Each structure stands twice: as C-alpha cells, then as structure tokens.
Amino acid sequence: MEILHQGFDGFDISFKTQIRPHFAAILEEARDKAIATRTEQLVTLNNISMHVSESGAKGGYRYACNTGPLGSNWFFKKPTPRDDWGIRASVRSLPLALSGVYSAYEDLLKVVGALAGELEADCVSIGRVDYAIDYLLDDFHLSPDQFVMHSRLTRTVDRTFSEVGRSGRVHSIRIGKMPGQQVALYDKRADVFAKSKHVWWEIWNGNLAARGLPPISRNHTRNRIWRVEIRAGKEFLKERKGIRNWSDFKTHCGTALADIADAIRYVTPTEDTNRARWPTHPLWLDVQERIRKDLTEMTSPDRIDYVREFLREERIATLDQQMVGYAAHQLVALGVEDTDLTDQSRLIAERLAKQIEARPDKFHDKLIKASDRCRFL
C-alpha cells in the first residue's frame, strides 16, 4: 500500500457575526443581477473578491458566494438582530490538499475580519470535518459484506452495471449518514474521471515527488486508487463529542475521527459465523493507525501557483475544444465543409474578425464578463 495523499478534505464552519450592512447591499444588487443574467457576478468587498450566485442556501443564508477553486464557498445572511450566526464557510478540497486545514482557518478569519470585523475566540462553530487517505492498491476488490458496524447505521452501495444488467464491480460504499458520522470507501480514480477533477494527478504526483518516488500515470492505475474518508457532521461533533469551537477541534478532532474508524470497520472474512469477530482488514488497520497516531496532512503550499496554472491550462483546453466544435458547426451551416482545410480555417477567422470589428463595444463587454468569470484563475 502506497499513500498518495492524506489530509482534511472538507471543513465547514459558522461564525457568530454579521457582514456589514453596506456589504449586504452590494451582495443584494449582485444577486439580483445574477438572477437576471443567470450568471455569477463578481464583487469585491474590502479587497475580498468573490462570485455571487443567483440563489442562497438552507438555514436562512440569502447570499451564496465563492472565492474560486482554491478558495471556499461562503454563505451570508442579511444582518438582523434576531440571528447572530450570520456567516458560514465551507473550505474546498484543493486548498485543504495544498495548504492544510490550519492555513485554511487563518484565511477564513481574514475574510471574516474584512467583512464583519474581528471575532472573539468562542464565536465559531465547527459544522463538518472530512478526513481522507488515498491509497495506491494492487488487486483490491471492495466488498459490501466486509463492513462491520452498528445495526442502526445505514449502508449505501454503488455498483458498475454490465450491459446485460448483472451487477458488476462495487466502486463505492458509504456507511452512516450526515450530519452524524459516516465512512466512505470508494474508487477515487473513477471519481476523478467522472467529475473531471484531473488536478488530483498533480497533487498525488507532487506528494510522491516529495518522498523521492516516481510519478503515477492516469493510464496505468486502473482500479488501483482507493480513498477512505472519515466524515464527522455537526450532530456527531457537538452532541456526542462536545467539539464546538476551534480550540475543541484542535484538541479532540483526532480522537473523534479515530472513534468513527473503530466503530465502523472493514474486515477480512473467516469461517466464523459472527462477522463482528472477523479480523480487521490490513487496509483498515493502517487507516486506524494513521488517524489514531496523528492527523497528518500532506501539503504542498509551494505548488499553489503550479496548480492554478494547471487549472488555467485546463480551462483553455476546454475552450479550444468548444471553439473547434462551433467552427465545424458553422462550416456545415454555411455549406462549405467540403472546402480545403486551410480555406475553412481562414473563413472562420475572417468571419470572427468581422464580428468583433463590427461591434467592438459589445466585444469589450464580453471581455469584461469573461475576465470576471476567470478572476480566480
């Protein structure tokens, strides 16, 4: 078993404070414009830039915003004396993988300070914590029947089905439900391809390079990358473990996650009819040891610019593909698809240039909108 990545993968937190009223007015205007245009709007509040979406979120949060793929999702309520808890944030997985949860927390405080003012130490509430370990495994086959857990916990199984309708390989299992406790074991390679999260190859290979190990190729790791996630929700953290604020998190989070990994085990089958007596699988023994010993984070803060450039190049490649598709469509519509390739390219370029030259003001407006959309790349 080779470790590709280890660290926090999700972190939700609420703040007992409210944004300043004039910031709420700016967000309200941006939200109205987002609804009218059905496009996120860029705003800058006290040097903090974020995209404002057209909808809010559960819990009375009127404004849903984000600070890009290397930032966080933010949720704000309209300032009111009836509700002191006016700000919630959810840190995305990329900044956690690159810089870790402690750096992310400091960044959150800077944003809250800029939008609402300084906080007192007990004015934060931890809502959810996800901890992930990515393994490079040979010949591992996930079996739903090899999980042992309390009877009250639910189990969700995802399978890949064959063309004839028979169930095939199991690629994901989730035990438990949020906002309680949950364990997930799933094919991370398949998840990366399904959700186009190809930046994870850069993170994995960066972690391997830091240990002097050779990189892995996305074309030669089929079915070999598995992720274990230990998830603790608000109900479990507060009601069962007494973890409420940042100080509690630093002191007791490791113990809380270790308790989940002990209560929900992946085991090795034997002839014993009592599955509770089946020995813990070597993979799970490693998970338990790593969580119990130390919540280590494999971080690469020096690779942030590299990852941002990777995301930018990925966006450019997507736009290139879209442009080629539109060009082919236009040539067919014009009835000139049978002409020479060089003539086709020249025709498309000339038509595009004429469109821009005919309405430079309109093109300038599109440039501004595109600049807003690409602000965080």
Image (tube, helix red, strand yellow):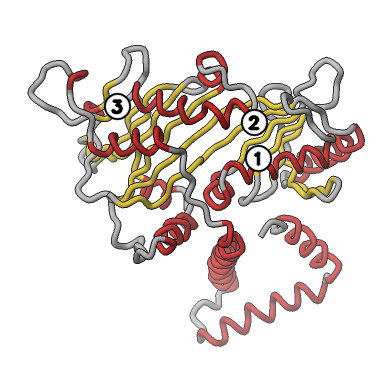
Q: Are marks 1 and 2 in contact (CB under 8 Å)?
A: yes
Q: Residues within 10 Å of mark 3 (few under 14, many from 20)?
A: many
Q: CA distance from mark 1 to mark 3?
A: 31 Å
Q: Indicate which disc, 1 or 2, sits on the residue closer to the N terminus.
A: 2
User: Can I make out residue 329 in this image?
Assistant: no
Q: Indicate which disc, 1 or 3, sits on the residue closer to the N terminus.
A: 1
Instruction: Compare residues 209 and 203 and report the one nearer the observer.
Output: 209
Q: CA distance from mark 1 to mark 2?
A: 9 Å
Q: Which element carries disc 3, helix, strand or loop?
A: strand
Q: Residues within 10 Å of mark 2 (few under 14, many from 20)?
A: many
Instruction: Compare residues 325 and 81 and report the one nearer the observer.
Output: 81
Q: Residues within 10 Å of mark 1 (few under 14, many from 20)?
A: some
Q: Which residue is located at x 54 percent, y 21 percent?
A: 237
Against 301, residue 46 (above or below) is above
Q: Are marks 1 and 3 in contact (CB under 8 Å)?
A: no
Q: Which element carries disc 2, helix, strand or loop?
A: strand
Q: Amino acid at mark 2?
A: Ile
Indicate left or right for 326 with 293 as reference.
right
Residue at numbered disc 1: 105
Q: CA distance from mark 2 to mark 3?
A: 28 Å
Q: Position of residue 361 (x, y in %)?
A: 86, 67
Against 376, residue 81 (above or below) is above
Q: Position of residue 173 (x, y in %)?
A: 33, 32
Residue at numbered disc 3: 265
Residue 13 shows which numbered tag?
A: 2
Task: Answer with the quarter of the image where residue 87 lies.
Answer: top right
Q: Amino acid at mark 3?
A: Arg
Q: Indicate which disc, 2 or 3, sits on the residue closer to the N terminus.
A: 2
Q: Mark 1, mark 2: which one is toward the viewer?
A: 1
User: Can I make out residue 193 in this image?
Assistant: yes
Q: Position of residue 17 (x, y in %)?
A: 80, 27
